[in-house]
Image (tube, grey):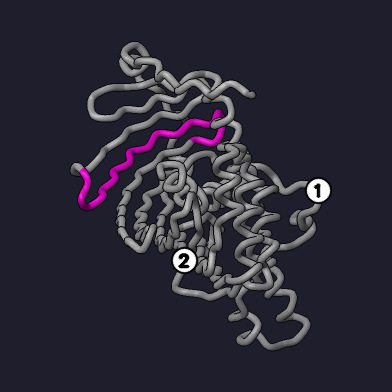
């Protein structure tokens, strides 16, 4: 069940990180160098048509907006993110139904290069033993996690795949391909100083998008991949807000309804996630405190069963 919770939380978080990737758009993506800013396009159209009011009020298309988001992301070196996640799960087995609710608050600081993350996660599950608070540093030097009063160091053989996955998630070129694949489903709206990209996905479209998102972000855990194959995501609602001037992400909300059968149990899950992004380029680095490094205990991973 822990694997399941990690997978469900990981899917929307991939897009949050993707939105702030700072790698340039490479082969197979639109050539932003030859595409003038939206304001300049509007100006050119005004000169051609003579209609200043109508053209000036036209928002960019989804494709234009996605292109500008990726172009702007090259200037992002660091940011902070606050996320709230609510998950309601119903488990039915042999005619008996159990429900499980989970609330998670995450506060994260991230520096792109070198990839370093500090986050504080508070998880509440009614009916369980209180609230769990976790602090974590993720860096090329190691992954340090504090549960209660003890700092643990993840083994190096586990750290490398995790860092690789996080770097994949912040590769804007690859992530653009994912969002561009649903560009025809995205609607653009304006609200004050924010452009909104919104989409309601269902059927084969949402299944393909979720699978592509998981694969492109370097998810290699066999159990997670198998869960993804069994998962039936019925609907996914996305709202993605960016600043009109900088094209930096400001808000991201996700709502997903899904079900699956696993080990004879029928699972129904509804999850909502609301994230706000801020404080761009205010941190030059994130350092793991020396006290944490000195006192961390190396976490022992369970041995994998030998191959037959």
Q: Position of residue 14 (x, y in %)?
A: 54, 48
Q: Quadrant of the C terminus?
A: top right
Q: Who is closer to the viewer here, 231 or 94? A: 94
Residue bearing the label numbered 2? 257
Q: Residues within 10 Å of mark 2 (few under 14, many from 20)?
A: some
Q: Who is closer to the viewer here, 89 or 76? A: 89
In the image, which disc is placed on residue 46? none
* Direction from residue 131 to residue 262 in the image, left or right: right
* Secondary element type, mark 2: strand
Residue at position x 18%, y 43% from top?
Answer: 130
- Compared with 285, 216 (above or below) is below
Quarter residue 143 falls in: top left
Q: Is residue 242 visible?
A: yes
Q: Quadrant of the N terminus?
A: top left
- Compared with 91, 135 (above or below) is above
Residue at position x 76%, y 54% from top?
Answer: 29
In the image, which is nearer the foreground, mark 1 or mark 2? 2
Q: Which residues are magenta?
A: 111-128
Residue at position x 49%, y 26% from top?
Answer: 139
Q: Is residue 251 visible?
A: no
In the image, which disc is placed on residue 27? 1
CA gap, disc 1 to disc 2? 34 Å
Q: Who is closer to the viewer here, 201 or 115? A: 201
Q: Position of residue 159 (x, y in %)?
A: 52, 25
Quarter residue 288 falls in: top left
């Amino acid at each position: 069940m822990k694997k399941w919770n990690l997978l469900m939380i990981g899917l929307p978080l991939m897009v949050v990180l993707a939105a702030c990737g700072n790698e340039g758009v490479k082969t197979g993506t639109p050539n932003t160098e030859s595409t003038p800013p939206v304001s300049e396009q509007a100006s050119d159209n005004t000169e051609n048509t003579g209609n200043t009011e109508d053209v000036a009020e036209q928002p960019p298309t989804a494709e234009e907006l996605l292109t500008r988001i990726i172009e702007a992301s090259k200037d992002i070196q660091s940011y902070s993110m606050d996320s709230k996640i609510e998950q309601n799960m119903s488990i039915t087995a042999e005619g008996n139904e159990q429900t499980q609710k989970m609330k998670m608050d995450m506060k994260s600081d991230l520096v792109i290069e070198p990839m370093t993350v500090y986050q504080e996660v508070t998880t509440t599950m009614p009916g369980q033993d209180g609230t769990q608070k976790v602090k974590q540093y993720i860096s090329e030097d190691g992954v340090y996690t504090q549960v209660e009063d003890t700092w643990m160091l993840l083994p190096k053989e586990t750290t490398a795949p995790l860092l690789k996955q996080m770097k994949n998630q912040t590769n804007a070129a690859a992530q653009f391909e994912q969002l561009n694949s649903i560009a025809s489903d995205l609607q653009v709206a304006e609200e004050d100083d924010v452009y909104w990209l919104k989409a309601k996905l269902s059927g084969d479209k949402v299944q393909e998008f979720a699978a592509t998102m998981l694969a492109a972000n370097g998810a290699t855990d066999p159990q997670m991949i198998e869960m993804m194959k069994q998962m039936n995501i019925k609907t996914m609602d996305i709202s993605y807000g960016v600043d009109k001037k900088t094209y930096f992400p400001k808000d991201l909300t996700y709502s997903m309804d899904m079900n699956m059968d696993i080990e004879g149990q029928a699972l129904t899950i509804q999850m909502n996630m609301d994230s706000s992004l801020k404080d761009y380029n205010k941190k030059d680095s994130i350092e793991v405190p020396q006290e944490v490094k000195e006192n961390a205990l190396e976490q022992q991973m369970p041995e994998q069963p030998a191959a037959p």
